Image (tube, coloured by chain):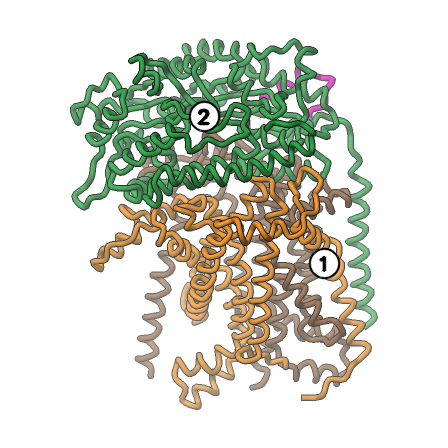
Chain colours: A green, B orange, C brown
Amino acid sequence: MKSYMRILILGVLFVFSLVSFSIVSSAAKKTLEVWAPGGKIWEDTYQEFQRTHPDIELKFVPLTGGFDERKQKLLSAVAGGVPPDVMWVDRFEVSQWAAFDALTPLNKYIPKYKLSPSQYIRQTWDEAIFPWDNQLYALPWQTDNRIIFWNKDIFKEVGVNPDKFPITWEEQLEVNKKLTKFDDKGNVTRIGFAVVEGLGANGSEWVLGWANGGEYMTARSTKVTLNHPKLVETLDWLVKMTDVSGGVEKAAAFKGTWGIEVQAPFFVGKIAAMINGNWTFENIARYAPNLNFGVSPIYRRDVYLKEKKLVPITFSGGHAFAIPKGAKNPEDAFEFIRWITGINGTRAYRNASIAFSKSMNRPWAPIIFAYQAANKESLEALAEQPVTQAIKDGVKLSFDLMAYTRFRDRSPAALLMQREFLGHARDEALYHKKTPKQALDDATRTIQAELDRLLDEWEKRTGKKLR
Amino acid sequence: MTKFKRNKEEIITAYIIILPWLLGLSIFIVGPIISSLMFSFMDYSIVLPPKFIGLGNYKRMFLNDPLFWKSLYNTLYMTVIGVPLNIVLALSVALLLNQKLKGEALFRTIFYLPSVVPQVAISLLWMWILNPQVGLINYLLSLFGIKGPMWLASEQWAKPAFIIMGLWGIGGNMVIFLAGLQNVPQHLYDAAIVDGANIWQRFRYVTFPMLSPTIFFLLVMGIIGTLQIFTQAYIMTAGGPMDATLFYVYHLFNKAFRDFHMGYASAMAWFLFIIIFIATIINLKLAPKWVYYESE
Amino acid sequence: MNTKRIFLRIIAYILVIIGGISFIIPFIWTVSTAFKPDEQIFLFPPKWIPEPPTIKHFKEVFEFIPFGLLYKNTVLLALLNIAGTLFSCPLAAYAFAKLKWPGRDMLFIITLATMMLPPQVTMIPQFLIFRRLGWLNTMLPLWMPSFFGNAFNIFLLRQFFLTLPKELDDAARMDGCSFFDIFWRINLPLIIPAITAVTIFTFMGTWNNFIGPLIYVRSYNAMPLSLGLRMFQEAYSAEWGALMAASLMMILPVIIVFFFLQKYFVQGISLTGLKG
């Protein structure tokens, strides 16, 4: 009996010695800790920063996984009082972090570094401002936008003018009917014009609502206006567009035939036209270089109906770099985010991504940076790339559209709004469970209740009054 | 059976060998559990310091959150239907693979394979298998003249689709059954055969009682696990269509990490805890009626 | 009798083969996608044989992430966790199953209860504990707790200990064995199949554990594959081919380990001859 007790006690002692050893060995050193995406392109970029900033010791922590997963990591670190110095965030979530006092306002650094909003695409800068206190909480890095893509060959096949995309809702509904195809069992085999996110489109609901003159929130994001008459009208049209394929279940069933990659069906002619993101260009170059496609901006319906004028509109999201509250090294952190979003950082990233595509034998097309001057360089770099003229023209168009872009309303309830709007209200209308008006009314009530709760708490904590 | 005599050596031995677990419980596990209970009575956003609000979270949950009820229903549906199906299938496969067939090692490995392949990787495959138009399942149904449902696109069929997917994950339970079957002594079968028992009788009177502790384990764990399902819906349907696959922990996750509403999520977690706890106690109480322990 | 037996065998084979085919599909899918050129990955219905097969996704894996380093980390973690689990769990399970001591049933209920709370709500308090212990920049949070046991394995092993006949222990007591000797020499060998199952689960659990590394790992030096694999799914471009290739390389050892461990699912020799 005695021998096993000795073994056990030794085992327990062993474990505890390991524990205490580890406590001693984790003494912290002052470095710049950056939590941002990993992979070859990014890591080359960080190396360039390290090379040009020998006095800063950069410690890069690769952030992997999706949006929600990154958030769990950051939340634990912030709650534990051990946040990184710099973190990569979706601009869409900046206001939520800011509302909970988890980010450092950057305004005081702006004069010191002679930064100006005009160096960046204005909307991307504004999206990093929290509208309740009007402070800047992140520097924007990259952005995107939404355009109409269509397959010219299919347009020819059904006898629609392949060179011009129809403008009005009525025309678009007509064309959608013509382009949509069924097999003899009544299954959809081609979607005509995809305008619903998840069913072939991306970001379409938001931009179509604005295009119709709708607003989702009031200017300082204190009131939800998701049931705005113009948004109800838009959702109603979306339902009609979806019913063309025999109802949303049929469309969803057809969507399932694409697998998980949302862009593939357009390349193989299963979607004739769609509202989708500018990243589609690089995908076309990579997966379907011979596709005969056209692109057009989305135009504002309200202006067109009134003045017969074509004013483009689009929708942008994107990422940014922020400094969490409690960061140990905010000065170097700001230098890092200024550098990486600025001309040198974007140049390093572009060069790395071109080199990477080349090494992988893939075509390259630029992303849109938030930093204005960077995009000129991107277009120059694109000119030398072996991609088709159609792709070059398309990319140029998407760059030009940034002047007309909008972003989703910033608020700490933004994620709830996204869920209630696209996950709920829209589906209730598409599945004909509620009328668009009912669905949006209900969602508005839910979001407003949460927003009020957040506002109460924020006003109490900061002593400011917004309402 | 000899009457148990309280024995000092036995008690000391027990306390020594339970010590690591006791330490583990008190260092790593009990603290967080108690904190979460406290958070359930607080307004806690993770980032800001928590504030006591009494039963506020619970009130909101029961009175003001239709998704709470919906997600609870979804999860109970999965548990009531999914858990028994899963156990029955796992047991059948384990019995089959315990027959000393040729290539047994290979088959056992094959049946375990789907549990090994990362979920993200096979979600793509499932989209195809369950696809109403070109998918495998509806094709097989059509051979029998049945028009298959819309599966993941349909409010009624999305949950059954998840249950079917779950059946591919029986590998783990199969492994436990295989281990359990090794504890059924061959001489019991031999005796049963001598008595003229047929296959069913041998299963009913030998295998089943001998396996009952294993089945009991899988039942308890199945309930605990299924009431907490989350990942697949997160990857494949985002809770849709029409919240049909918004499971309880998915809703909780939304509240905790998307809405920074950890206090509310903790209240949800504790309500779930109570449900699971009651279910487990019922299981433990019913166990003596059908679980047979050689030891007792 | 004999023809009936043969008939049943044939049915068993048919069932196993049909089941086997449906269960091997996900794996074949992974293999086939890993070797597919980009443009064939999304074909629907799927193309099962890549034309022509390519190994470029495997090259991509090594370009994207330090695969070797992550592999090493994963193997190390798996071994540590297995060692920890096999140290702590059988002991605790034996105490719950075979020994009588004050507080046993209460502690058993508590043990079960630790599994009943969704981990999402205990994650952050747990993080604070590991921070206080000073473990944040180490791999300790990912393996050290296993040396203290976990409820699932303890419960599982307890159930198996309970199936062992008590007469064995009583006989051994008569012969003057200590309780630990009974555990070590008599009970433990009889539940080797269950120990094998626990080993497999621990190995798998470590191999696939994503959320733990996500929260605690702060450098490539401590990063396991489960986390690295997610780098193939960035916001704008999911690298499906590379993801499949990496998954394949990641799961092959698991399959091999399983293949060799499953042979322990045979009747313990001592048990067969026991009461006969």
The residues tagged by marks 2 and 1 sit, at their Cα atoms, a distance apart of 50 Å
- Residue count near mark 1 (Cα–Cα under 10 Å), binned few <14, some 14–19, many ≥20: many
**Is B83 placed above or below C99 here?**
above
Q: Which stretch is magenta?
A: A44-58
Quarter of the view holding residue A467 = top right
In this rendering, position of residue B243 left or right of residue B48: left
The residue singled out by tag 2 in the image is A360
Q: Which mark is residue A242?
A: none
Main SS of the magenta part reads helix
> In the depicted view, which residue is nearer to us: A298 or C50?
A298
- Percent across and percent down for residue A364 are 43, 20
Label 2 chain ID: A
Secondary structure of the residue carrying numbered label 1:
helix
- The residue sitting at 35% across, 72% down in the picture is C9
Q: Which residue is mark 1?
A: B25
On the image, the x and y values in percent for residue C29 come to 39, 46
Residue C47 appears anywhere in the view: no
From the viewer's perspective, tell me whether residue C206 is left or right of residue B207. right
Circle 2 residues within 10 Å: few <14, some 14–19, many ≥20: some
Circles 2, 1 touching at the beta carbon (< 8 Å)? no
Q: Is residue C66 above or below residue B221?
A: above
Tell whether B221 sits left or right of B135: right
Decide which of C71, A255 is in the foreground and name it: A255
Q: From the top left corner, tell me how far across and down residue A411 is, in percent.
A: 55, 30
Q: Is residue B172 magenta?
A: no
* Residue at disc 2, secondary structure: loop
- The mark closer to the camera, 2 or 1, is 1
Furthest residue in direction bottom, as rendered: B195
**Quadrant the C terminus of chain C occupies:** bottom right
Instruction: In the rendered view, tell whether residue B171 sits above or below residue A171.
Output: below
Question: What is the quadrant of residue B23 in the picture?
Answer: bottom right
Q: Residue furthest front?
A: A467
